[in-house]
Image (tube, rainbow, N blue to C red):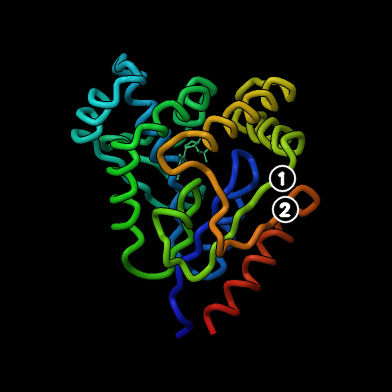
Amino acid sequence: MSKQIQIAIDGPAGAGKSTIAKIVAEELGFTYIDTGAMYRAVTYKAMKENINLNDAIALEKMLLLTSIDLKPSENGQLVYLDGVDVSQLIRSNEVTANVSEVSAHANIREILVKKQQELAASGGIVMDGRDIATHVLKDAELKIFMSATAEERAKRRFIDNEKRGIPSSIETLKQEIIQRDKFDSEREASPLVQAEDAIYLDTTELSIEEAAKSILRLAKEKME
Ligand code: DC
């Protein structure tokens, strides 16, 4: 059997991380973990319970009484919040607009990072997020920092939204993406940065298949 490795994929919103990570995991028979979905699930619940998203203590109290489970399915990874499937609900524009604020709290990150590390403890893993290579899986055998121009990423989110039946405009999405990147990169707790030992992959001109292929090639080298 080939070696079971950890693959960390980080990068800004809309770079193609989750789509590509899913393909890579499937090809290798590895488990895929979408950490952004966890921050989204916390944000969704906090908004539903009218918790002030600025209030780190209240959010932590809520999170300690919350269960978040990621389950693979034929239609990709499903996200269960307290036993209820919220996979679609956590992709709404409202959650997207507020998730950066929630994910900036160090105490919330600490709890979720611990959970992510537990999930990754056994077997081959492909995990995507913002701080996977720098904090969650510092010893990952393969680290990728994936990006694309804001223009291209907005276009992709627009097509994604269309498929999900979520109305949006490319220009608004682009502005939101730029804002969210800025917030995620400038926050104090585990900001979005490329790890020193990560490989930079620009997906602007690449198809999903091409990007997945180049990661698979690198992964196979590490698995030999
Ligand atoms: O990848 P995404 O758009 O679903 O992520 C949602 C937000 O969660 C993103 O704006 C930043 C935050 N996030 C994070 O801070 N750390 C991670 N490991 C993953 C996501």
Q: Residue at x 33, y 25 (%)?
A: 45
Say whether marks 1 and 2 touch (CB < 8 Å): yes
Question: In the image, which disc is placed on residue 202?
Answer: 2
Q: Residue at x 41, y 60 (%)?
A: 137
| Residue 90 spot, x, y in % from top left | 45, 30
Crowd rating for badge 1 (residues with CA inside 10 Å; few <14, some 14–19, many 20+) = many
Residue that carries the numbered disc 1 in the rendered image: 148
| Residue 21 spot, x, y in % from top left | 56, 56
Q: CA distance from mark 1 to mark 2?
A: 5 Å
Q: Residue at x 41, y 34 (%)?
A: 103
Q: Residue at x 60, y 54 (%)?
A: 145
Question: In the image, which disc is placed on residue 53?
Answer: none
Q: Quadrant of residue 172?
A: top right
Q: Quadrant of residue 178?
A: top right
Residue 214 lies, with reference to residue 160, above or below; the image says below
Instruction: Residue type at mark 1: give it.
Output: Ala
Instruction: Residue type at mark 2: give it.
Output: Asp
Residue 208 lies, with reference to residue 41, above or below; the image says below
**Of residues 197 and 162, which is closer to you in this image?**
197
Crowd rating for badge 2 (residues with CA inside 10 Å; few <14, some 14–19, many 20+) = some
Mark 1 residue's CB less than 8 Å from ligand 1: no
| Residue 121 spot, x, y in % from top left | 32, 64
Q: Is residue 137 left or right of residue 11?
A: left
| Residue 15 spot, x, y in % from top left | 65, 45
Q: Quadrant of residue 4?
A: bottom left
Q: Earlier in the sequence, mark 1 or mark 2?
A: 1
Q: Please tell me whether mark 2 sits on a helix, a strand or a loop.
A: strand
Quick one: which residue is furthest to the right in this view?
A: 205
